[in-house]
Amino acid sequence: MQDKLFRPLWRIGCVVLLLTILGPAAVWGAVGCDLNDPDRDVARLFPESTGYKTIYQSIQKKGGERLLATVEKRLGDKFRGLYETIDVPYTIYEIFSGKKKIGYIHGINQKGQFGGIQVFLVLNLDGSIRGFYIQKMTSQYAAKLRDARFGKSFTGLTLKDFDGYDVVSGKATGRVASIKNPAQEAEADFRAALRATKKNLILMDEFVFSSR
Amino acid sequence: MITKFQIAYKNLLRKKIRSLLTLISIALSSWVLISLLGFNQGYEASLNKDIDNMGFQLMIMAKGCPYEAATLMLKGGTGLRYMDESIMKDIVREPEVDRITPIMMSAVFDPNKGESGGISAYFGVEPKSFAQMKPFLKFKQGDWFTDENGYETVMGFEAAELEQREVGDVILMPEKNVQFKVVGILERTGTQDDGTIFVPLQTLQKIFHRTNEITTIGIKLKKGVSSVRLEEQLYKLPDVQIVSLEQVKDTIMKLISTAKIMVLSIAVIAILIAMVGVINTILTSVWERFQEIGILKTVGAMPWDIFELIWIETLILCTTGGILGILLAFILAGLTDMAMRFLLPYAPGGGLVLIDLKLVVITLAGIIAIGLLSGIYPAWKAGRIRPLEAIRGEVGK
């Protein structure tokens, strides 16, 4: 009798087990580059905000192949591989305080040494960086690159500052040159973060600031 | 010559607002009904697909409380119970068994995943036996690893996309700081495999110090055999539990069925309420046209003609409302899918709402049938109107 009751209960339990742990997909964040918890993250990154609006854009939608060519030229590098394609959706968070827009948050995926790096920029209305946030990164030295002190080195930088940064060779001039790698052992990821920042700024310029 | 259909249609247009409101009520209740019936079909179809895509019909796991294991897994520990690989020798001897494959699931906590970290899960598999269980798995790039002790990995499509990995790249297992070379990326399957990272079983056992231990055995049965005897035999094995995926599916469907019955009841009640609205609309229309119907009978219309006229009005309302409701269900299917995923504790991959031609026809036929039944009383009442009384203006007798 007990066994007859136990078996169905056990099967239900196995369903729970199967469907939680056999579903690693459930523990991965969104495949695009969205904030994991926008309500929480926007409030943290923009403490004075009262709300936000989410906009989706893509290079294909905004300007197609011509825009892609423009972005690649400005970046100084081609879009590479299986995942850096013309149809990737980009999520732009417009941040508001009351009815007044006060800034933007935008993230992009970047290939790192051991996994994808999700780099979010917190931007003022003039396009200058007010915050730098790595939401996800896989590396033994990730903690150093995700440290707030490293993020602070991006504060105040603009797209113009990145004009002199060569994403291929890693050579930097001006203010970008003063950004120090906090994890020498993770040079590839440091350069990936800089590439991601430049790409992020270029895309925001094309999607938002140039349109205004 | 004007037809009865045209007369009925024009009669409905005489009171546009009333007819429109009645139409809307039928459309809304039809939408709810067909969406729920579509959900019934879609959920079961998606669940079948998910279960079938697991590749095996039975799973053996170590004895232990699965709820505790799931909780521990979600908190970042392994939390799983392990069994010795040697029991595979006993299982493979059973006559119903076609093939088996051992699996070891393990997880590590990654503090650099989001604000508060997250877990990364890994499946240790024997590529030869696992691939035989799932011949439908196709590769976007590369192939399975061949070295049973190698540090190579095959990634599901979404896992690879999240990590921006291609064949030749390297991934790092957090906590253990072990690197794996990506040798294969699977095509998207729409199942849990999309988010899975597969590594060689022996390698994973070594990393987690679980030599000769596994968490699961997948069993594929020979075609056409029953698993009942086999399950009874397998229960005799020490310290293991048997999961029949067919029974898991039945359990999930039973869990859902109570909710489905309740919600379907509500949909049926909504339809009945809409039909009461139809009766009300048509009856009101009959009372308003009392004298007109009397005159029609005076000039030669038979009771059956009047009955037909009124019944056709009901048919037009129910058919139009039903079709509108079905169209609404198609348009809002995506929204319904999202709402169901939000509300349900578990939703399989794939579409949850499946509305096919058969369902459309059955639902529309049902709505029309109920509508025609509703229309019988007003039509009968109209047919019974006495011409002289109607002309004299005596209403309602």
Image (tube, helix red, strand yellow):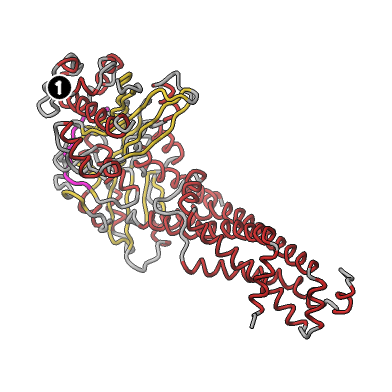
Identify the image quadrant of residue A134: top left
Residue that numbered label 1 is attached to: A164
On-image quarter of the N terminus of chain B: bottom right
Task: Check residue B266 for magenta coloring.
Answer: no
Identify whether A139 is placed above or below B58.
above
**In percent of the image, x 17 and y 36: which residue is there?**
A72
**In percent of the image, x 46 and y 65: which residue is there?**
B356
Foreground: B349 or A94?
A94
On-image quarter of the C terminus of chain B: bottom right
The residue sitting at the bottom extreme is: B300
Foreground: B165 or A177?
A177
The residue sitting at the front extreme is: B1
Which residues fall within the magenta stretch?
A: B174-185
Identify whether A93 is placed above or below B5.
above
Task: Check residue B180 for magenta coloring.
Answer: yes
Q: Amino acid at mark 1?
A: Gly
Residue A49 at x, y percent in the picture? 45, 22
Q: Chain of mark 1?
A: A
Residue A63 at x, y percent in the picture? 26, 42
Residue B223 at x, y percent in the picture? 33, 67
Identify the image quadrant of residue B6: bottom right
Residue A195 visible in the shown view: yes
Residue A39 at x, y percent in the picture? 45, 28
Horizontally, is B81 left or right of B391 in the view?
A: left
